[in-house]
Image (cartoon, helix red, strand yellow):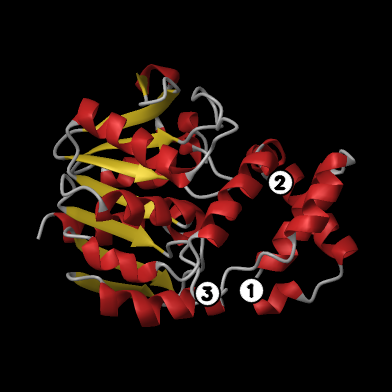
Amino acid sequence: MTESDTGLTANDTHGILSKDGTKIAYLSVGGGPAVLVLPGVLSMASDYAAFACALAQRFTVHVIERRGRGKSGPQGDDYSIAKECEDVLAVQRQTGARLLVGHSYGGLIALEVARGNSVFTKVAMYEPGVSIDGSMPVQWMAGYRKKLAENRNLDALVEFTLADAPARLAKLPPWLMKLLLSISFIRFPGSRQMLNLLEQNIREWQEIARLDSTYENYRQVTAGVLLMYGGRSDSPAVDLVVERLPSVLPRCEMKEFPRLDHFGIERTAPNDVAKAVGDYFLK
C-alpha cells in the first residue's frame, strides 16, 4: 500500500529535528485527538497508510518515518533505541499527541518511550518485538552480515526471513524462499524497499537482543496498554509476550485477531485493527 493508494501525498509530510539534530519526517492525516504510529523493521511510514487512513476517521494520525528511512535522517553510528525514543518525543512535542501505536519493533520503542514518560495516556501495540529468554532469534546475524558485505542483499534477506519465519515457513530451503521473495517483488513492487533497509534492520535487531529479558522494566509504564496479537502468527516469541507482558504492565487489555498474522495491522486487515485501536483510545 502506498500513500497515493489511500489519498496521502507528499503534502502530508512534515518534519522536526530530534535531540541529536537528525531530521525526523512523519505523515499526517485526519482530524481529532492526535495519535503517533511507529512502524516495524523493514517497513516505512507509507506501509501503514491504510491503517492510518482508517484510524483517521476519528483521529489525527501521524505516522513516523523512523530514522534511516525516506525523508528522515540516517540512523547514525551511535544508533540505539534511546535515539528512537528521542525521535518520538520530538514529534510528540510538535503534535501534542497523547496516544501511541507501535507494531513489532515499533511496539518495543513504544514500550521504551512510555516507561520513561507519562505524556502518553494510552498505548496500543500489535505484537511488540520484545525478546524474552532469547525468544527473538539472533543466530542469523553472522551469515546476514557476511552476505551484506558481499553485496548479496537478497540472500541476506532470505537468511533473516527464514530465521524469523513462522514454523510452517522456516523449514523451506533457502532457494525456494529466495524465489518466493523474488515473485513478491514482482507482484508488489513496493516491497523491494526492504532491500534498502537491511543495514537498518540489523542495527535494530541488535537493540532487540540487548534488551532481551528486560521486560520487567515495563512495570514503569503508567499509560493504559492494549496488547494485540494475531491468532495465526505462529511465533513462540509472540506467545511469550502474550503470556508475560500482561503480568507486568499495570493497566493492560488484550485483543486477539484469530485470523490475522504478524502483519495484520500493516497488510492483512488494517481496517479491523484500526477499529480496535480507535475503540480502545476512545473508551
Disc marking residue 166: 1
- In the depicted structure, whether residue 81 falls above or below residue 282: above
Given the image, on which type of amino acid does mark 1 rest?
Answer: Pro
Kind of residue sitting beneath label 2 = Arg
Q: Position of residue 93 (x, y in %)?
A: 21, 29
User: What is the C-alpha distance between the residues marked 1 and 3?
Assistant: 10 Å
Image quarter for residue 167?
bottom right
Reading the image, the residue beneath label 3 is 237
- Residue 57 appears in the picture as rendered: yes
Q: Nearer the viewer, residue 201 or 230?
A: 201
The residues bearing labels 2 and 1 have C-alpha atoms spaced at a distance of 22 Å
The residue positioned 46% from the left and 65% from the top of the image is: 130
Left of 251 or right of it: where is 139?
right
Q: As displayed, is residue 1 above or below residue 245?
A: above
Give x and y (percent) for residue 112: 35, 53
Callout 3: helix, strand or loop? Answer: helix
Disc assigned to residue 187: 2
Q: Is residue 231 visible?
A: no
